[in-house]
Image (spheres, helix red, strand yellow):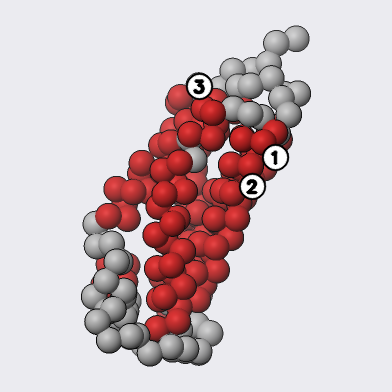
């Protein structure tokens, strides 16, 4: 019996499902929190820019561009790995860690913006990085597949910026959800 082949349109459908899950989660949390807050909600861009940010923080417009590229690349890599023989060493680990990464991707906006928590943002980013690192290890060490590994490179490059940014935001800003912080004073000349 031959293995089912996954096609590009299934990747598009998967991404649409992730986006729907992301927005559904955001709306559910927003509905739960609305009665508690009498203040009007600010949009994501305003919330991001209202925080103390380091000089290396990218502008808000960079995020949808970077994540469109990252998503396209990781979905293409996921489809490629899905189409490898089921007994390929590391295939299951790659796919499982990518599934975890997609759950974290879908939860990020809710954890950060809807819950108004830079601590949550840093934690989800770190967990996403761990899941992506496990996928990279599976691709390189177990599968020994350059194509699978290459599908993660844009995401890993972005995470080299996102992790220090997330930690800095969590350290420099008050977190209304956890009612904690700031933990550090931004050094002179480091704030954007």
Q: Dots 1 and 2: beta carbons under 8 Å? A: yes
- Indicate left or right for 186 with 6 as reference: left
State the mark number for residue 93: 1
Q: Disc 1 vs disc 2: which is toward the camera? A: 2
Place residue 37 in its image quadrant. bottom left
Where is residue 171? Give x, y as percent: 45, 82
Q: CA gap, disc 2 to disc 3?
A: 25 Å
- Indicate left or right for 97 with 18 as reference: right
Q: CA gap, disc 3 to disc 1?
A: 21 Å
Looking at the picture, tell me which residue is in the foreground, 154 or 35: 154
Looking at the picture, tell me which residue is in the foreground, 180 or 2: 180
State the mark number for residue 134: 2
Q: CA gap, disc 1 to disc 2?
A: 8 Å
Q: Residue at x 31, y 74 (%)?
A: 54
- Mark found first going from the N terminus, 3 or 1: 3
State the mark number for residue 7: 3
- Quadrant holding the N terminus: top right
Q: Is residue 20 above or below residue 140?
A: below
Describe the element under mark 3 as helix, strand or loop. loop
């Amino acid at each position: 019996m031959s293995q089912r082949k996954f096609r590009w349109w299934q990747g598009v459908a998967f991404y649409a499902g992730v986006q729907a899950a992301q927005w559904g989660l955001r709306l559910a949390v927003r509905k739960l929190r609305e009665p508690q807050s009498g203040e009007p909600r600010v949009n994501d861009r305003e919330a991001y820019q209202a925080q103390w940010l380091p000089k290396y923080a990218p502008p808000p417009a960079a995020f949808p561009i970077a994540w469109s590229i990252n998503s396209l690349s990781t979905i293409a890599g996921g489809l490629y790995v899905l189409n490898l023989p089921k007994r390929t060493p590391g295939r299951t680990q790659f796919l499982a860690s990518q599934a975890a990464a997609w759950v974290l991707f879908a939860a990020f906006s809710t954890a950060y913006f809807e819950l108004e928590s830079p601590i949550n943002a840093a934690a989800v980013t770190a967990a996403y990085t761990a899941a992506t690192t496990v996928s990279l290890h599976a691709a390189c060490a177990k599968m020994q597949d350059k194509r699978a590994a290459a599908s993660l490179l844009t995401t890993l490059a972005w995470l080299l910026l996102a992790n220090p940014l997330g930690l800095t935001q969590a350290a420099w800003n008050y977190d209304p959800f956890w009612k904690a912080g700031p933990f550090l004073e931004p050094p002179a000349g480091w704030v954007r």
